[in-house]
């Protein structure tokens, strides 16, 4: 994939969407191991049910990691200057997450070029799970 050039980026440009396979128990178990987040709400159905949930659900940071992959498929990770999210909904088993981003600002500071992005992830039903933003050096 060709990396973006500041001269060709326009406000309103859409990043190439990134869709992941449906969330399953294996994904949650593996992410828990990779991240060190063994919160039982994400891997133990009995614990989840005792907590009032119908089943386990995805780690919020898994969704943020997916958005991070959206960014790094577009630019090198060293170009990310800020990246923040707001968790907006629970990602349940079977949800297939698609991450998208849109350029909302293009600017220069001290001779360096930047773009600001709005980010979101949504499931296959269009339900927003995470909203976020990022600033990238281009």
Image: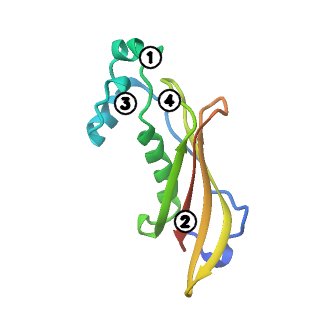
- Relative placement, left or right, of 8 versus 53 is right
Query: Which dot marks residue 28?
Result: 3
Q: Tell me the element at label 1.
A: loop
Query: Which dot marks residue 22?
Result: 4
Quadrant location of residue 122? top right
Q: Dot 4, crowdedness within 10 Å: few (<14), some or many (≥20)?
A: some
Tags 2 and 4 in contact by the CB under 8 Å rule?
no
The quadrant in which the C terminus is found is: bottom right
Nearer-N-terminus badge (1/4): 4
Nearer-N-terminus badge (1/2): 1
- Relative placement, left or right, of 115 versus 12 is left
Q: Position of residue 106 (x, y in %)?
A: 66, 72
Report the mark closest to the observer, 2 or 4: 2
**Between marks 3 and 4, how big is the CA–CA gap?**
11 Å
Q: Dot 3, crowdedness within 10 Å: few (<14), some or many (≥20)?
A: many
Report the mark closest to the observer, 1 or 4: 1
Q: Position of residue 29 (x, y in %)?
A: 32, 29
Q: Tell me the element at label 2.
A: strand
The residue furthest front is: 51
């Amino acid at each position: 994939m060709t990396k973006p050039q500041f001269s060709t980026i326009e406000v309103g440009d859409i990043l190439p969407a990134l869709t992941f396979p449906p969330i399953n128990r294996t994904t949650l178990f593996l992410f828990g191991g990779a991240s060190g987040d063994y919160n039982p709400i994400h891997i133990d159905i009995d614990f989840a049910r005792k907590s009032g949930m119908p089943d386990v659900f995805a780690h919020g940071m898994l969704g943020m990691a997916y958005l991070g992959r959206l960014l790094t498929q577009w630019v090198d990770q060293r170009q990310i200057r800020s990246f923040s999210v707001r968790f907006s909904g629970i990602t349940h088993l079977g949800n297939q997450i698609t991450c998208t981003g849109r350029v909302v600002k293009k600017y220069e500071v001290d001779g360096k070029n930047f773009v600001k992005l709005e980010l979101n992830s949504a499931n296959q039903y269009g339900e927003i799970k995470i909203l976020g933003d990022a600033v990238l050096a281009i």
